[in-house]
């Protein structure tokens, strides 16, 4: 197949040729202030005799000069005033400069945009998102300041997705004031000694202030828009608190703690238990249960470790669940009212009701506050399945009340919560059926990850039914059963307990958001901007599961820092929340930990990547621990060691991945990890070996061949 000629090479060659001609033939000598003064009278005479030809010729030269980004535009603008006068000269110079700038913009887009997006795809996505939001303001601001190198603006904007027509119109408007100043100066050409003399310090300051106007205007529009809703409410002359936090989970606790640490007066209102879902019904109890199930599984695996058991170990399910409660009670003091009171937080037990952007009612008392933080968390999603009311379904909130082990347990949902609890109950002796509507469990992970976990689950007796849609629940004297649909056929699953693990729904009702009109997204979460302010009210902030986009305890705490700082120090200082490096882990066995992109997400976003995979079955410590399974998979930029994402499947994957989280946060590549000493023998060595695999795959083959010849020569 004949290779198609790339016209971009021709365009680049033509541009280079024109630039070379400009600098080697002395054409540039005509675009100087001295030349303009010397030839002004002749140019004016030509214009008088041939107005159209001179106008078109002048415009063409101006367009070519600005399009090629060669020196001379300033002198040409002066010449416009000297030859054509202020009015006509401004029209010609303004149009020609804008056309030339747009051609330069389009040239950069045609020549370099494709390669820039390939090489810096992820970064270009972020830049284009910012350009889409703020590009017009920043372009207008830069155009208003004449000392800013316009050719850089043309080239950089050409690499983005900024619309060409909008670029032309904004450039035309933004460059007009500066063009007018230079054209007007050109009418008095004899008085100009140097180009620097045109713009006095005072005039430069005026342009700088003018350049600030779009940003100031944007801020003022945002300010008045956000306060449009506040005008309907009376602002107290004095506030009881700097900040009131509603919700005593991870997000609420951290935001309240930070506020008290900087000596702000803060109240924390919690209607149920301090610590929220994580402590009472989520992370803590589930990990306690997982640990008990894992220990019992080690009993079963005793022979693998050369151990013989004289009796069969028995499960006392009631004691297992009592241990879960003991773990919760041991951790409770960390999140208790007593501790946070000592830290300076005023803790209030009761149901909060937001009655205005400045007022919160609790226990019949109205508290005034400068800022409100919504940290009300989320609850398990209960689907509308016909017949569900016939049984008492379990959720991740209520399963901890069990004291008798379910004989037949159906887990509806193959996500992280469903997988963790399904495996644990199977290890504790329940007959578990895991039902998932998608074609595989752990659908957010790559297929090879799902395959490893599925194999592990099946080996432990978990029945996995994928591509099964729950239709209804039936109950009679023989018990309950779930009717599912798969490939057009109904499948009957008998159970005595059913666990709903289909995700979580944000708590956004019952405490005043509806009456206040706070915007709620289609996903049922509180809508927030990059500063975590609600879109309606600038003094109402939100963090944690109630707003998302990630429903993790560590993300809630991460958001809480931004909320506390922004609420207490805005408008003097504000920070945009940073979601660039968010890790998470599913605590199944093997564990599945991830940070950044996986292959599925990279393919979906069109991001090119290189895959490095290291099998943990090769790791000495994993072999010694009889946990030689799983892998480390690293996605990097092709040809570079920059990490795009990491997935680890294996024993203690949630701990091992921390090194990659740090590396991605601070821009460290695989070469740095390879050059770091890791203790032997540890599981964390898997990170170094994965980096070693990458190094071997990306070794410079040409250099290695030269080295081989060098060493061959030295043996002679």
Image (cartoon, rainbow, N blue to C red):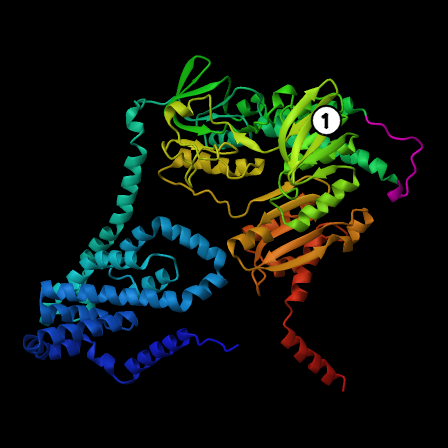
Q: Position of residue 417 (x, y in %)?
A: 64, 35
Q: Judge by depth and name the residue closer to the eye, 111 or 455.
A: 455
Residue occupying the point 29% across, 31% down: 228
Q: Residues within 10 Å of mark 1 (few under 14, many from 20)?
A: many
The quarter of the picture where the C terminus appears is: bottom right
Q: Position of residue 472 (x, y in %)?
A: 63, 28
Q: Is residue 432 left or right of residue 202?
A: right
Residue occupying the point 74% across, 31% down: 425
Q: Judge by depth and name the residue closer to the eye, 290 or 337.
A: 290
Count of numbered tags: 1
Above or below residue 428? Residue 619 is: below
Look at mark 1 in the image and give the residue it sits on: 495
Q: Which residues are magenta?
A: 303-315
- Residue 57, located in which quarter of the rendered image? bottom left
Residue ranking furthest to the bottom: 716
Residue ranking furthest to the top: 364
Q: Position of residue 507 (x, y in %)?
A: 50, 27
Q: Judge by depth and name the residue closer to the eye, 609 or 77.
A: 609
């Amino acid at each position: 197949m004949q290779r198609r000629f790339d016209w971009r090479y021709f365009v680049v060659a033509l541009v280079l040729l024109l630039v070379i001609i400009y600098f080697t033939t002395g054409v540039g000598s005509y675009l100087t202030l001295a030349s303009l003064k010397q030839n002004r009278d002749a140019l004016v005479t030509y214009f008088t005799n041939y107005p159209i030809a001179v106008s078109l010729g002048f415009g063409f030269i101006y367009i070519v000069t600005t399009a090629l980004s060669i020196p001379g535009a300033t002198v040409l603008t002066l010449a416009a005033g000297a030859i054509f006068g202020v009015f006509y000269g401004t029209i010609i110079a303004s149009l020609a400069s804008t056309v030339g700038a747009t051609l330069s913009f389009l040239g950069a887009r045609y020549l370099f945009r494709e390669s820039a997006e390939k090489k810096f795809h992820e970064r270009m996505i972020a830049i284009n998102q910012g350009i889409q939001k703020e590009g017009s303001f920043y372009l207008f601001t830069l155009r208003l300041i004449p000392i800013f190198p316009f050719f850089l603006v043309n080239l950089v904007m050409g690499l983005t997705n900024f619309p060409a027509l909008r670029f032309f119109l904004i450039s035309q408007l933004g460059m007009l004031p500066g063009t007018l100043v230079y054209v007007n100066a050109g009418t008095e050409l004899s008085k100009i000694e140097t180009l620097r003399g045109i713009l006095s310090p005072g005039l430069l300051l005026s342009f700088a202030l003018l350049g600030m106007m779009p940003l100031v205007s944007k801020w003022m529009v945002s300010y008045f828009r956000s306060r449009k809703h506040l005008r309907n409410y009376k602002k107290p002359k004095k506030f009881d608190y700097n900040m009131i936090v509603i919700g005593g989970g991870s997000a609420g606790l951290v935001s309240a703690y930070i506020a008290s640490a900087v000596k702000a007066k803060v109240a924390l209102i919690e209607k149920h238990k301090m610590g929220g879902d994580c402590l009472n019904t989520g992370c803590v109890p589930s990990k306690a249960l997982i640990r008990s199930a894992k220990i019992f599984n080690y009993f079963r695996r005793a022979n693998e470790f050369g151990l013989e058991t004289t009796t069969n170990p028995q499960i006392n399910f009631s004691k297992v669940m009592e241990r879960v409660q003991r773990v919760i009670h041991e951790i409770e003091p960390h999140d208790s009212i007593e501790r946070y009171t000592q830290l300076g937080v005023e803790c209030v037990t009761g149901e909060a009701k937001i009655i205005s952007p400045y007022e919160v009612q609790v226990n019949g008392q109205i508290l005034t506050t400068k800022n409100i933080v919504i940290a009300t968390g989320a609850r398990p999603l209960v689907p509308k399945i016909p017949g569900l009311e016939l049984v008492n379904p379990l959720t991740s909130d209520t399963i901890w009340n069990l004291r008798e082990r379910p004989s037949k347990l159906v887990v509806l949902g193959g996500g992280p919560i469903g997988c963790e609890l399904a495996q644990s109950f199977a290890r504790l002796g329940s007959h578990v059926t895991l039902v998932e509507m998608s074609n595989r469990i752990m659908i957010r992970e790559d297929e090879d990850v799902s395959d490893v976990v599925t194999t592990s689950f099946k080996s432990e007796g978990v029945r996995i039914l994928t591509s099964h849609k729950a239709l209804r629940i039936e109950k009679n004297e023989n018990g309950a059963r779930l009717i599912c649909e798969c490939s057009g056929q109904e499948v009957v699953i008998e159970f005595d307990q059913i666990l709903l693990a289909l995700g979580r729904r944000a708590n956004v009702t019952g405490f005043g958001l509806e009456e206040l009109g706070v915007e709620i997204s289609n996903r049922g979460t509180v809508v927030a901007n990059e500063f975590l302010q609600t879109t309606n009210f600038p003094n109402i902030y939100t963090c944690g599961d109630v707003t998302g986009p990630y429903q993790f305890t560590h993300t809630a705490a991460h958001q809480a820092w931004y909320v506390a700082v922004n609420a207490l120090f805005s408008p003097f200082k504000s920070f945009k929340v940073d979601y660039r490096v968010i890790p998470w882990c599913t605590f199944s066995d093997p564990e599945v930990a991830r940070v950044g992109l996986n292959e599925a997400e990279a393919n979906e976003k069109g991001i090119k990547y290189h895959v490095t995979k290291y099998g943990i079955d090769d790791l000495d410590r994993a072999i010694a621990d009889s946990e030689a399974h799983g892998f480390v998979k690293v996605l990097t930029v092709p040809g570079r060691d920059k990490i795009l994402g990491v997935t680890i499947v294996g024993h203690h994957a949630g701990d091992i991945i921390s090194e990659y989280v740090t590396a991605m946060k601070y821009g460290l590549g695989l070469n740095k990890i390879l050059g770091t000493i890791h203790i032997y023998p540890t599981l964390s060595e898997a990170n170094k070996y994965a980096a070693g695999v990458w190094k071997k795959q990306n070794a410079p083959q040409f250099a290695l061949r030269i080295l081989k010849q060098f060493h061959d020569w030295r043996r002679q």
